[in-house]
Amino acid sequence: MPNLLEVKQVTKKFGGVVANKDITFSFEEGNVVGLIGPNGAGKSTLFNMVSSIFPPTEGEIWFDGKRIDRLPSYKIAPLGIARTFQNLQVFKRMTVLENVMVGLHTNSKSGILSAAFKLPGAKKEEQKMYEQAWEELKFVGLEDVADVEAGNLPLGKLRLLELARALATRPKLLLLDEIAAGLNHNETAAMSDLILQVRKRGVSIFVVEHDMDLVMRVSDQIVVLDQGEKIAQGTPKEVQNDRRVIEAYLGT
Ligand code: ADP
Ligand code: MG
């Protein structure tokens, strides 16, 4: 399998803080890769660079054979990268279905304006987006609340909505930023099942997650960061038994 994502000697400095230091790893297409490490290890920083929220200070990031580390973030989604956010980004006054549709419009060729101005071709595209949105709502099990205003949903369903919105863009790579944060045990287990189902669809998934049960269950590979450095990489089993990883977590 070719590498879908390649992070090459990436360093990120914020003033005097080295948030990521010389990080290199690659990501095989079709895999789930977990990114773990203690608080402040640099996980969010790496994630934000892969989604081009800011560029690395040094190094390169390649996706699907293209260098992406200098692209503006709006060019990332059309390449096939979608993400969810730890701090939910839903429109509370819109319905669940509308929230998924918005994600598709911002990613479409003609954009939200051509639909608003009813330009030729917009109706057909609108119909296609509607079908895609509906399909993903069914996939995550939110079809019953499609017409409910998102602001009225509990956290567990909002996390599913974020997942549906990201999936509706049909990404090759899905970045999940603490998708299980605030979920209870059963909801977290259901989320693990869903992630594995997404993997079966052939989507590659990059997961930042605190819940170790979830990470260990869904990941093919795990990358461990500590104080900005990659200290280990391997299968869940390898990483769990790695002395440096255990020390990093115990803070010794
Ligand atoms: P994690 O997600 O693993 O908890 P982060 O990537 O958020 O870690 O942070 C890594 C380090 O970089 C921390 O020391 C953090 O304070 C610092 N940092 C992250 N983002 C910024 C920023 N925008 N400006 C300054 N420092 C930052
Ligand atoms: Mg973080």
Image (cartoon, helix red, strand yellow):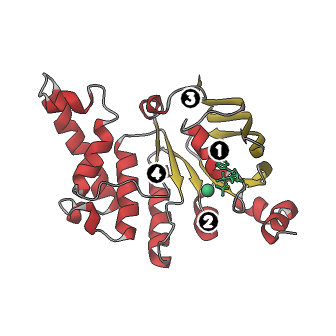
Crowding near the residue tagged with mark 2, few <14, some 14–19, many ≥20 C-alpha atoms within 10 Å:
some
Image location of residue 138, percent across then percent down = 28, 57
Pointer 3 residue: 64
Which residue is drawn at the image coordinates 19% and 27% (left, top)?
114
Image location of residue 50, percent across then percent down = 59, 38
Q: Quadrant of the C terminus?
A: bottom right
Label 2 secondary element? loop
Q: Is there a contact, CB below 8 Å, between mark 4 and mark 3?
A: no
Which residue is drawn at the image coordinates 61% and 29% (left, top)?
69
The alpha-carbon separation of the residues under discs 4 and 1 comes to: 14 Å
Mark 4 or 3, closer to the camera: 4
Crowding near the residue tagged with mark 1, few <14, some 14–19, many ≥20 C-alpha atoms within 10 Å:
many
Pointer 4 residue: 84
Earlier residue among tags 2 and 4: 4
Q: Label 4 amino acid? A: Thr
Crowding near the residue tagged with mark 4, few <14, some 14–19, many ≥20 C-alpha atoms within 10 Å:
many
103 or 55, which is in the foreground? 55
* Residue labelled 1 has its Cβ within 8 Å of some atom of ligand 1: yes
The alpha-carbon separation of the residues under discs 4 and 3 comes to: 20 Å
**Image height check: is 55 above or below 119?**
below
Q: Label 2 amino acid? A: His
The alpha-carbon separation of the residues under discs 2 and 1 comes to: 16 Å
Mark 3 or 2, closer to the camera: 2
Q: Label 1 amino acid? A: Leu
Pointer 1 residue: 46
Pointer 2 residue: 210
| Furthest-front residue in this view | 15
Earlier residue among tags 3 and 2: 3
The alpha-carbon separation of the residues under discs 1 and 3 comes to: 18 Å
**Image height check: is 57 above or below 194?**
above
Earlier residue among tags 1 and 3: 1
Which residue is drawn at the image coordinates 20% and 31% (left, top)?
125
